[in-house]
Image (spheres, grey):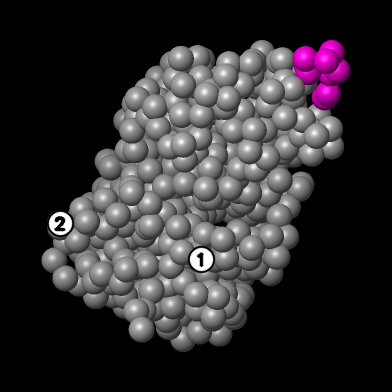
Amino acid sequence: MVAAPLGARRVVVTLASQVAEWVARVRFADLPSDVVDATKLRILDVLGLALAGAETRFGRAIRAGTTAVSPPGPCRILGSGDQVGVTNAAFANASFPQALEFDDTHNESIVHMSSPAVAAALALAGRLPVSGQEAIVAIAVANEISARVGSVAPGQFHRRGFHPTGLFAPFGVTYLAGKLLGSKAETMARGAGICGSVAAGLLECWVDGTQSKFLHSGFAAQSGITAALLAQAGVTGPPTVFEGRFGLFASHLQHPETTQDLERVTSGLGGRWESRNASFKPYPAAHVLHPYVDAVLRARDAHRIRSADVAHIECPVAEFNVSIVCEPLAEKLAPASDSHARISLQYTLAEALHEGKLDKSAYSTQNLQNPEILALAHRVHYHVDPGFPGPGRFKGAVRITLHDGRVIEETQEHNLGSPENPMSAAQLRAKFDENANGVLSAAERDRLAVEIDDMESLDDVSTIVELSIHHHV
């Protein structure tokens, strides 16, 4: 917060206001070319995941629940094409991609940033004219803000039972919606203040393997749009929502030893793009598990290992990962559901090694009940290694001891999909094809991919929504 010099009229510049001033002035020409390219790939990735997620049992429930609570409206639910209100479309379309735990993540904050941003922008495009350039700017801005707010105290929220996506992505979407609505900076800052009252995301579902975490992306999209619309209508909210006495961080992180760096919200804004430090996902599992999956699959293929060959797998982990993917042991060794299994180091490595892959079809009921996979999960162990990096870098290693006495070690310094070890555009297109295959034909997928690749030339991005709907012939 910045105050005027002594003797002058006191003017307080809040973090939310500084962000709003930047959002109000940023234009497509201000975006670095790599941010534009990455944003288009994120849109493609999210749409593929939304179509895959819509076909799951969870996705079908989301569709049914959303159409039950929403009267007919101008916005479309991806895949099915149901017409609902703008916040309801945003909710459903942002929830779908979380169903497989397969959407991109900002490494340090562990925010799933793109699903709520893409869903919100496309929902708003059903309510007002949105060009391709405007959508790219709004999504890039939302991702940047979600990542920055989430980087103030990385790792501190998971350990307290909060899901970063539920807490931080609503702010990104609030600014996205304000940008597309043409709101003034002052209005956007008020919107952020309103949004703070609904930023949430309890992780109690990790105890029993239920699905409420998958809703957090949907709630982020829904509440962000709602906050922006309320602010535009004249409702007020505190622009001190980040740094204030009862703001986001003071209220959620009350332990006196918690370190916070509020400058992360605005430092270098517009010059240094924090969203560059986000990873795409090659595997439908918690992102911190990915380098371990990389390592175990490489060891399996190189040494032709089968699950029956394995006596013991030892994994060094960073301390902050223990409460996320390693403990409590009973939950991790015998997951109650696919959502439970996706956050288990022990089960995930066992299935990956047993099956030789971890893709869209992973974590099936059959696999979750497979006695060989469950037995192997009991032979996966971890220990905290102080030398392993904390939030911001996902490193993994496995030491596999075989029954014949051989010991095989593999280390993955950077997860596949990270800036240091990126997935190629071709790999991301293949992922999109696999995920959208159950809904769109090859020709329909090609048309959608071409449209997104040339998105900056579109006058109206609602065409992208139409191409993401299965049209029965």
Vertical order, 135 against 217 (above or below)? below
Is 407 inside the magenta-drawn segment?
Answer: yes
Residue 111 drawn at (x, y percent): 50, 43
Label 1 environment density (alpha carbons within 10 Å; few <14, some 14–19, many ≥20): some
Is residue 363 located in the magenta-colored stretch of the structure?
no
Q: Look at the image and tell me in which quarter the C terminus lies.
A: bottom left
Image spot of residue 175 (x, y percent): 40, 58
Position of 355 with respect to 180 (left or right) is right
Pair 1/2: label in front: 1
Eyeballing the image, is 28 above or below 207? below
The residue positioned 55% from the left and 85% from the top of the image is: 457
Q: Is residue 457 above or below residue 176?
A: below
Please state the horizontal and vertical placement of residue 364, each as a whole percent of the image. 47, 40
The numbered mark at residue 10 is none
Q: Which residues are magenta?
A: 401-409
Residue 391 left/right relative to 333: right
According to the image, label 1 marks what residue? 437
Closer to us: 290 or 370? 370
- Residue at x-position 68% and y-position 26%: 307
Residue 442 in view here: yes
Whole-number angstrom distance, CA of label 1 to CA of label 2: 29 Å
For the point 47% across and 46% down, the residue is: 100
What's the amino acid at mark 1? Answer: Asn
- Residue 252, x across and y down, in percent: 38, 27
The quarter holding residue 121 reads bottom left
Residue position marked by numbered label 2 in the rendering: 69
Name the image quarter holding residue 207: top left
Number of marks present in the image shown: 2
Q: Which residue is pictured at 49% across the width and 38% down the height? A: 363
Q: Amino acid at mark 2?
A: Val
Q: Secondary structure at mark 2?
A: helix
